[in-house]
Image (cartoon, rainbow, N blue to C red):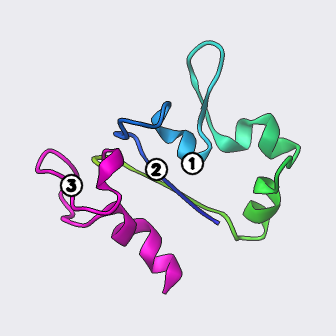
Amino acid sequence: AVFVGSSDDDCINPPLSSVFQFVDEGGNPTWMKESMEYDQDTFGLKTMDEEGRLITQAYSGYDHEEWLRVPAPHGNATNTSLFELAVLPHLQ
């Protein structure tokens, strides 16, 4: 499974929840491996991770609509859509 997100996503809140980063009650980021869902393997994240079948990647400079188009000049300097950068290589 491939989960990709951007810290600059302007639609998903918190932005990195797409890569299973949570915010605790105090507003602090909690990483996937620190969560109860991961620890108890409630839906297979831990199993996939241990088997090498879980990929989580976070990028900066991409807003929510830049998954399929090249970011605006303020964004990432790679001149590549997030789909091409992070998803397509896993489909080839």
Could you tell which of marks 3 and 2 lies nearer the N-terminus?
A: 2
Task: Point out the residue furthest to the left here.
Answer: 73
Q: Which residues are magenta?
A: 63-92
- Residue at 39% over, 40% down: 7
**What type is the residue that disc 2 sits on?**
Gly
Mark linked to residue 19: 1
Q: Position of residue 27 (x, y in %)?
A: 56, 17
Q: Residue at x 76, y 55 (%)?
A: 45
Q: Label for residue 71?
A: 3
Q: Are marks 2 and 1 in contact (CB under 8 Å)?
A: yes
Secondary structure beneath dot 2 equals strand
Q: Amino acid at mark 1?
A: Val
Quadrant for the N terminus, please. bottom right
Amino acid type at circle 3 is: Pro
Which quarter of the figure has residue 25? top right
Q: Residue 90, image x and y in percent?
A: 52, 77
